[in-house]
Image (cartoon, rainbow, N blue to C red):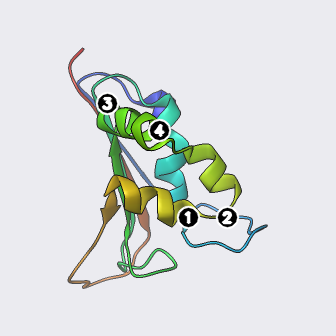
Amino acid sequence: LAKSIRPGEALLACGETQVIVKHPGKGGRNQDVVLSAIPDLPKNSVIISAASDGKDNIEVAGAIADSEISTKELKQHKLDPIDAVDKNNGYNVLHQLNDHLYIDRVTANVSDFMLGLGGKE
């Protein structure tokens, strides 16, 4: 998904990804989508992934991350997004990055949705 984001374009996707739980941890499929995308986000881009019912396995809807702030903060805090996904512990990384997405009012539960926005180069 991240590799498909192009400058000046919006990429929309929906559906529910599958998470294979191997370790005790805290997180959800939408948080994993965002964490997995971070290393491949093009310059000046952002990705959002959220559950339309506002709950991504826990009391957050999902997450949002951009190509520059997240990379800088990952290095500063010595965080590895792929390791967090592998260990089913994405919540803690996203919490430290302050990248969780909350939905206060839910009127429908249709699907998870993902949005990739490519900024100008």
Residue 73 position within the rendered picture, expressed as x and y whole percent measured from the top left: 37, 40
Tag shown at residue 19 = 2
Alpha carbons under labels 1 and 2: distance apart: 6 Å
Question: What SS does tag 4 mark?
Answer: helix
Left or right of 15 in this view: 21: right
Of label 4 and label 1, which has the lower sequence position? 1
Give the mark nearer the N terminus: 1 vs 3: 1
102 vs 49: above or below: below
Residue that appears at 51% across and 32% down: 39
Front one among 32 and 51: 32
Comes first in the chain, label 1 or label 2: 2
For badge 2, the amino acid type reads Val
Neighbour class for label 4 at 10 Å: few (<14), some, many (≥20)?
Answer: many
Query: For the residues marked 1 and 3, what is the alpha-carbon distance in whole angstroms?
Result: 23 Å
Quarter of the image where one finds residue 44: top left
Q: Nearer the viewer, residue 17 or 103?
A: 103
Question: Which numbered marker is on residue 68?
Answer: 3
Q: Which label number is shown at residue 38?
A: 4
Distance between the Cα atoms at labels 4 and 1?
Answer: 15 Å
* Residue 120 vertical position relative to residue 73 in the rendered view, above or below: above
The amino acid marked with disc number 1 is Arg
Q: Mark 1 = which residue?
A: 29
Residue at (42% x, 79% y) in the render? 55
Q: Earlier in the sequence, mark 2 or mark 4?
A: 2
Amino acid type at image mark 4: Ile
Say whether marks 2 and 4 touch (CB < 8 Å). no
- Give how far apart the Cα atoms at labels 3 and 4 are: 9 Å
Measure the alpha-carbon separation of dots 2 and 4.
17 Å
Amino acid type of the residue tagged 3 in the rendering = Glu
Where residue 25 sits in the image (x, y, percent)?
A: 64, 72
Which one is in front, 56 or 85?
85
